[in-house]
Image (cartoon, rainbow, N blue to C red):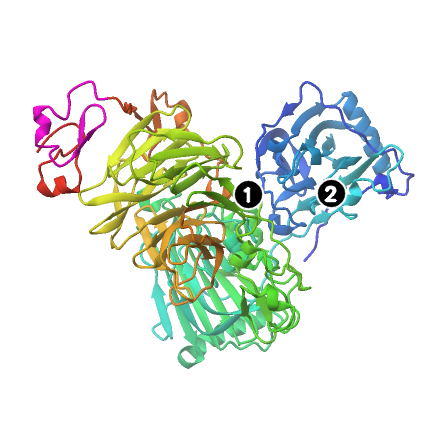
Amino acid sequence: MERWWLAVVAVLTAFGALATSQEPSEPLQWIPMSENAITLPAADDQATEIYFAPGFPFGDELRHKIYVSTNGLISFDTPISTFFNQPFPSFLGNFYVIAPFWDDINIVNGGTISYEEHASGSNAMGDVNDYVSAQIDENFEGIWMLVVFWDQVAPYFGSINDANSFQAILIMDSSQDAYAIFIYECGLLQWDNFATIGYNAGPEHYDNHDPSSSDVACVNHPANNFSNVFYTLHEAEPLPPVDPQVSYLDFLPHTTNYLSNGLLPNCDDCISQNIELPSDFPFGNFTHPSAYVASNGHISFRTAYTHFNAELFPTTNPGIYWDFVLAPFWSDVDLRLAGNASWEIHTTAESQDLINTVSIFIQENTASSSFSGSWMMIAYWEDVHPFPHGAGSTTEYALSTNTFQAIIITDGTKSYAVYTYRCGEMDWGDESTVGFNAGGDYFQNHPVTGHFQSHFISCLQNISNGNPTTNVIYDLVPNPGSVLPGDIPPFHNTIGSCSAAGYTECCAEGDCRGTPLYGNCYCDALCRDRGDCCYDQQFICPTFPVTDNYVILAVDPGVLHMSLNGSDVQTLVSGVNERAYGIDYHLADQIMVWSDVVNDVIYMKSLDGTGLVTELVTTNIAAVDDLAIDWIGNNLYWTDSTWSRIEVMNLETLNRAELLRTGPNLNPRSIAVDPTNSYMYWTELGQSSRIIRASMDGTSEQLLLGFLAQPNGLTVDIAEQRLYWCDTAAGTVVYGELGSAGLVSFTPLVLEGGIGQPFSISVSATSVFWTDWSTNSLLATHKIYGSGESGHQFTVFDASPNTPRGVEVVTSSQQPTAGISNPCNTSGCSDICLLSRNTAGFTCKMADDTSPTPPSAGSCADAEYDTCCSHGACGGYPATCFCDIACYERSDCCDDIYDICN
């Protein structure tokens, strides 16, 4: 394959490093920002678009969309604002990125970010022209220039006293020659959390600047106190063609001779049960006893992933990033009305000829000339539609279909994946991923992935030869007996064995996995959250960076803050309430709220524990067992088990209203909201406890699950679209996959030592946390353990002798805001605006008069109230007879809240 290279010249003038043989020029100093400069808003993890119609040459294309990220990078075509930096190519392998100082920056803590465009003739461009001319040893005249200035910006965990300043310049001339220049002033880089400096132009074309970012800060202090990094961006050729294959493998038909098989139901975002394989399947540095087939065109080996949002490998999704995934065509597939996904497992005992056919194909197209498979699994996706086919869409795109196949085959040592596509039968795939991921450091993205064009695999090479199919082949164990580069994942060791002395601490809460050949200490996601797992091959167990991830815990009689591993415990609230119960937070507004079921008050305070405690709700509430904040619409929801109702309050206006009442003999307990989909979820306790879902305006109630024992805790995993709940009486923690129809499936967590008596539940990016009343502890484990697999758990915090109640993990992954609009901003609602599943996206609601004074119209003592309230309670405005359980049983109480007596 002919390789293309992006010509890169790294010039650190402070150290005399040169791009040419010319004597070093004077370093370029700050480019002044004029009054025309545009300042980015003070927000965290955001990217602002600049549209440049002529296009800026970078790599093989003119790029019209430029995004300035708060986290010290500039991306092209796609907004990238992730704070988790890594050396290139990292998980941004196929993206185009320039990074003057990519790190976790938070300008909310201080500093400004601004940018300014310049045309030819400006004084600032003249200085840059002279500098570029000196670097390339020829005259350069720019016609357009972009200057971005990160001025005195603070780290996420820091203040303006730890500020950095740096600039990035993009400049091009009329010949479409383009350059990037990074400017640093000596002494003004005061922090460096292993920042990334360099560029990425696809998976094979990148540079990580050397010396490291600390050296960019001018440790040698040149006379003018400035240093630069210089990159040439325009010298590139088109992407290489796909390697031609020697022969092709036809689409393997379904057979009746197989070891086992299966078929997914008509569903959206669903996945198979754990499929047991005939023997362990070698993939990456590990062997895998089982696999999952997903409707969305991928196969996973460690965890059941149903994600519909395809990303380039290794992805920004922490779960997939560390997992082992094969993607013949990962995209948003909808099986609800048509198409099917299925699988068959074959061994030589049933299907010797079929396995021989695939083995010969691999011999002819790889270096394994003697490969002979012992078993294989075939996964079929046939005539599958893109979402939203199940919604009845009749658009041409929704009616398009794809047919493709994935084969995994092994001889016990070597393993291959073969993807097969029928020529002319791949009709859709605007944002699809083709490739594989083996734990983050070993992955491949097929060229079709980088361009998001499915027709690249629709037989452009083979159709002219009359072949009916085209194939992609991946060697999943390229060098048996040796560890893959970088190891997979980087949070485990590859030297020695799990019993080696150096693994004692690293594997204290991890698993010893792999084969004797590799002898790896595999630390699962829970260990990474705890921060007690190795991150390299030298038995070093550092603290894992958790950024905004920490726990807030309601414990009699206060509120505590602690890290995910239970360390750094701080008291946020004490001496105010008698029994803190439900708790939630608003990350963007940096507040937390909690309920006190003894004093009947809902309190509010700053999330960091500073400032005064505010009594947010003090009247007409009784037992507020739980509450939830809608961080998009800025509304607070809570359950009141005494009055058997759910109420809502706007956090800006403090207007308040009753939203709904629960049914007879049922009291609302736990509540959670998902404003990204305008759903609210709650549990009801009674003779037949249950879980309900409704629109966030209280309409369209839907029973998700009934006949439960005591579902006290409930939370929505926003990032993964899963519902987690815990049942105190049954001693279970369960998760279910959410879909448009409700719960697609549900799976209990199976843990060594059992669950205990779980009361409240919350999730982080990788783990689930719950309070256990049997031990007065906060416990945690990995978010997903399939049925029949035994997982590990650990005690995060022992609250004895006090009782832990509500728990929340404070994390931005569970309160996303990027790209989510708030329809209430333009609703015109006078009292309360609620997010809704209706076509408008919102519902206006009148506020209740919650004054504790007697109602002004009518009285519960009036004649029409005598029977209705004989066993009930009187309150509210207008005068409302609240009927308790005894009244429901007598059937002589109001059947709604408008004083109507049966």
Q: Residues within 10 Å of mark 1 (few under 14, many from 20)?
A: some
Where is residue 889? Give x, y as percent: 11, 43
Q: Is residue 598 left or right of residue 225?
A: left
Q: What's the mark number on residue 235?
A: 2
* Disc 1 residue type (three-letter): Asp
In the picture, the quarter occupied by the C terminus is top left
Across and down, in percent, residue 749 comes to 39, 60
What kind of element bears circle 2? Answer: loop
The reply, left or right, for residue 800 in relation to residue 690 is right
Q: Which is nearer the eye, 529 or 14?
A: 529
Asked if 747 appears above or below 850 in the picture, the reply is below
Up-down relation of residue 885 to residue 256 (above or below)? above
Answer above or below: position of 257 versus 56: below
Please tell me which residue lies in front, 77 or 124. 124
Q: Is residue 423 visible?
A: no
- Whether 901 is among the magenta residues is no
